[in-house]
Amino acid sequence: MAFAPTKPWKLPFITTWGGSPNRNLPTNSAEEAHLVALDGTPTHISSVRDISDRMEAEKRYRDIFDNALEGIYRTSTEGKVLTANPALAKMLGFDSAEEFVSAITDAGSQVWLDPDERHRYTALLENCGSVLGFEARFKRKDSTLLWVSISGRRVCGADGRTLYYDGFVEDITKRKSAEEKVKISERKFRAAFMTGADAFSIATLKDGLILDVNERFTDVFGYPANEACGRTSTQLGLYADADRGRLLSEITAKGYVSDLDFVARRKNGDLRSVLISANVLEGEGEELLLHVVRDITEQKRTEAEKAKLEDQLRQAQKLESIGRLAGGVAHDFNNLLTVINGYSVSVRGNHLFQERIWW
């Protein structure tokens, strides 16, 4: 007579260790029992396997799972959440992992902002087996946007078919926001660079190799971007009276240059008066120099003509003053001559009168 074996089950045992005195230690065990007929008597035969180490390992892994800072998940191929840790639930606005698991039956529509992104992600998992750093947009329980980076793997059964997907989720919303701000700043800088009223150029600080110029640079120096970029200001002969060393010495001394007076040479050889300002920029692995060149040729010409006119005005004013002085002197002199003439007439008249009386 024989009986079917029972399924294994777990139960605590007290294990007695030899020695003096004996020590009794609790042990987690798995028992598999069989009922057999032994000499006509039903007999219970069982085997006991110590699983204490395995259960301790499971506890350690459960602690890691529950206390991880990153989200951890397991989903079915259809998108049903099979398990998730508290970090992922909190990340998505749920009060607990249990609430999250019970609520999400279709991650593609309930968690992913764009279901097509999940289709692309799972396609990569099916083709490659694992994916690292897949960036996507999730939506929280309150429908607010959440940027995440997902790393996952495909888990297959013995027949090679996919059983489920395991993975980690990192919240990168702050990073994406910072990147977007940087992109906006770059676009603003680019717009200001290209449309500026002054000549803008970016060159390497070490050797002065021109990397980029705006349209105004072409107006001032006569070189289009395709001729200027890849060459240095020395090779182009942009500055007539001073070499690049003068600019670098100012940069080294103060860290920047503001309105440094230069004489620039155009492509056709014409000389232009310019003011140069420059600042050091941090590039990718090297320092760059942003040049701002303002053409003041017409301004200086206007100032020179104004100075000439002012000098002519001053000369005219001096002549006018001299004329007024001379006119005043002549007027006073005429007054004196009038008095003298009148006195002379009076004296002469008296003299003639006396002569008549005498005769």
Image (cartoon, helix red, strand yellow):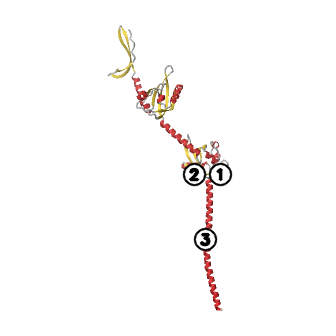
Q: CA distance from mark 1 to mark 2?
A: 18 Å
Q: Is residue 357 above or below residue 172?
A: below
Q: CA distance from mark 3 to mark 2?
A: 47 Å
Q: Are marks 3 and 2 in contact (CB under 8 Å)?
A: no
Q: Residues within 10 Å of mark 2 (few under 14, many from 20)?
A: few
Q: Position of residue 265 (x, y in %)?
A: 65, 49
The reply to whether residue 233 is in sight is no
Q: Position of residue 321 (x, y in %)?
A: 61, 68
- Give the quadrant of the N terminus: top left
Q: Nearer the viewer, mark 3 or mark 2?
A: 3
For mark 2, what is the residue? 259
Mark seen at residue 271: 1
At x 63% / y 85%, what residue is drawn? 349
For mark 3, what is the residue? 325
The part of the image, by quadrant, that contains residue 44 is: top left
Check disc 1 and report its element: helix, strand or loop. strand
Residue lying furthest left: 21
Which callout, 3 or 2, points at the residue further toward the start of the chain?
2
Q: CA distance from mark 1 to mark 3?
A: 47 Å
Residue lying furthest right: 268
Q: Residue type at mark 2?
A: Asp
The reply to whether residue 72 is in sight is yes
Q: Residue type at mark 1?
A: Leu
